[in-house]
Amino acid sequence: MAAIQGEIRTVDFDDVRATAAAMEGASCVVSALSGLEPVVLGVQGQLLDAAVQAGVPRLIPSDFAIDFRKIPPGTNRNLDLRERFRRRAEQADIRLTSILNGAFMDMLTGVMPVIQHRLRSVLYWGSADQPMDFTTIADTAAFTARAAMDNDSPRLLNICGDRVTARDLAQIAGTVRQQPYRVLPAGTIGMLGLMIGLAKRVAPGKPGDLYPAWQGMQYMRNLFAGEGMLDTPFDNDRYSGLRWTRVEDVLREDARWVGKR
């Protein structure tokens, strides 16, 4: 931060007046808060109130995800919270810019266990040809930084590093690993929904867990059901000089690290 003449200000979000004072003169506030209701609605709500009080003209909420406006209510706990915050924020006296990036591409290296390298397979529910949107965390951050400096940023920006199907993932993984990969049906979308319900009862996770196993399964259900797909055309080209990472880039880098271990 010092190298770019940035300034770090430590504030107590519970103190809205102090937080507002720290924001004075800002042209945009970017929220990267992540958590459950106390964070997404509580702390981020206090950030919103402080930004309005400070007269900040624009806010970029922590909406970095698939298009949660389109998913059926109750199918994704974490995204339901973002939808609730959206409704509140749209009533505030501030201009909003939401950046939707699909799922984070970084998850394909293990957190989202659809690529099974030991089986040389890609798991899928429903259709192997359902498109899914992915963008890396780094690319999302770079685009967000440009949007924060854009006084004319619109209400919604859709970005996507790669739109791929399970069949595409198998082809890409096979190319990277130089071995044939196949698509492996894991069941229907309805069966995945039943698995989620069972996981919530058997392994609910600890109170306050942001990503218990069933929550990750909810994200996969949304993706494989085609819920929350981003609108096209994407806004990738709104700002010049940005390089967009493809799924092949991520899987190739992951394979390189595996080879070093």
Image: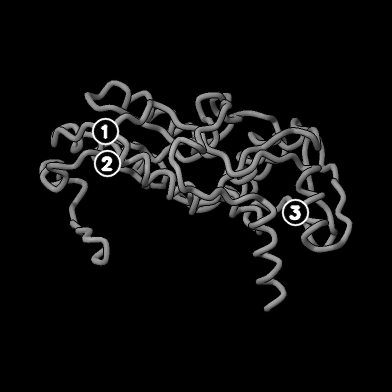
> In the rendering, which numbered label is found on residue 29?
2
Instruction: Estimate how packed mark 3 is, as few (under 14), some (14 to 19) or many (20 or more) residues with alpha carbons within 10 Å.
Output: many
Q: Are marks 2 and 1 in contact (CB under 8 Å)?
A: yes
Q: Secondary structure at mark 3?
A: strand
Left or right: where 219 falls relative to 38: right
The amino acid sitting under disc 3 is Ile
Please state the horizontal and vertical placement of residue 111, each as a whole percent of the image.
62, 55
The amino acid at mark 2 is: Val
What label sits on residue 58 in the rendered view? 1
Q: Earlier in the sequence, mark 2 or mark 1?
A: 2
Say which residue appears at 59% left-offset and 54% top-offset.
106
Q: How is the image coloured?
A: one colour
Going from the N terminus, do you reach mark 1 or mark 3 first?
A: 1
Q: Position of residue 235 (x, y in %)?
A: 50, 33
* Spatial separation of the CA atoms under disc 3 and disc 2: 37 Å
- Image coordinates of residue 60 in percent, x first then y, are 34, 37
Question: Residue at image x 22%, y 58%?
Answer: 6
Is disc 2 surrounded by few (<14), some (14 to 19) or many (20+) residues within 10 Å? some
- Which residue is at the front of the view, 67 or 34? 67
Q: Secondary structure at mark 2?
A: strand
- State the SS at label 1: strand
Labelled disc at residue 115: 3
- Seen at 65% across and 48% down, the residue is 202
